[in-house]
Image: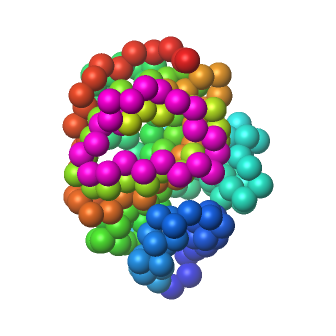
Amino acid sequence: MTTKFDELIRRFHAYLTSVDNALVRDAVVRIGWDMPARALEPHGISGVRHLHRAAELAPPAAKPLVQWLAEHRDALRWGQTYTEADFGKAFIDNYGWLEVFGTRGHFANDEVAAGLLILGPEIVYPDHHHVAEEIYIPLTGGAEWRMGEGGFRVREAGEVVHHASNVNHAMRTGKEPLLALYIWRGGPLAQKSTVTGTATQGGS
């Protein structure tokens, strides 16, 4: 069955196949890309207002995907794992994710989940961890990432960030938003992350 979201998964797959990284190549070939579509009602979040800026910042390989997201943002089902009670209103107004495929995404997959995370400028996503292994690829550069006991360091667009199972990690943005592609595998695909820090607002 053809759906209006076929172009989303096509562009998502096309970008992933352009990434020259062994871990990503292995993940891509293990995914069965002929996935059934789900009929999901759209759900908006305020953080999608950053998508047009993300499209301006995205490198050439990622632009077709990010531009499609910006143009069709109101037709998609965006989600949030946390609430204002967890990290405050400023965080919630600038945070969210879109599951392209997985146990609750626009396409059904019980073995792996993948989608996009958005964070607005001057936001800290505090230390958290989860059972599933996670592969992140920032589609906009300049945000800082931390893993384990290490400090924050800037990751550029297209750089692969690998979080093994249950390894603490955190992100913080500066003057620009972050849009990052993620792949979850090897654990509960809809698990709420365990937070090990406290959210604070502010950039680098």
Determine if the magenta segment contains residue 156.
yes
Q: Main secondary structure of the magenta part?
A: loop
Q: Is residue 123 left or right of residue 198?
A: right
Q: Is residue 75 left or right of residue 36?
A: right
Range covered by the magenta-colored residues: 148-171
- In the foreground, 27 or 82: 27
Q: Is residue 9 visible?
A: no
Up the image or down, 88 lies above or below 35; here it is above
Tell me which residue sits at (43%, 26%) in the image: 151
Q: Is residue 46 left or right of residue 101?
A: right
Tell me which residue sits at (37%, 62%) in the image: 113
Up the image or down, 40 lies above or below 51; here it is below
Q: Quadrant of the C terminus?
A: top right
Tell me which residue sits at (66%, 67%) in the image: 18
Q: Is residue 137 visible?
A: yes
User: Which residue sits furthest front?
Assistant: 150
Up the image or down, 150 lies above or below 100; here it is above
Quarter assignment of residue 193: top left
What's the image's color scheme? rainbow
User: Percent position (x, y) of residue 65?
Assistant: 66, 58
- In the foreground, 152 or 73: 152
Determine if the magenta segment contains residue 189.
no
- In the foreground, 85 or 172: 172
Tell me which residue sits at (48%, 48%) in the image: 161
Number of dots carrying numbers: 0
Quarter assignment of residue 155: top right
User: Percent position (x, y) of residue 203?
Assistant: 54, 17
User: Percent position (x, y) of residue 8?
Assistant: 59, 65
User: Percent position (x, y) of residue 92?
Assistant: 42, 28
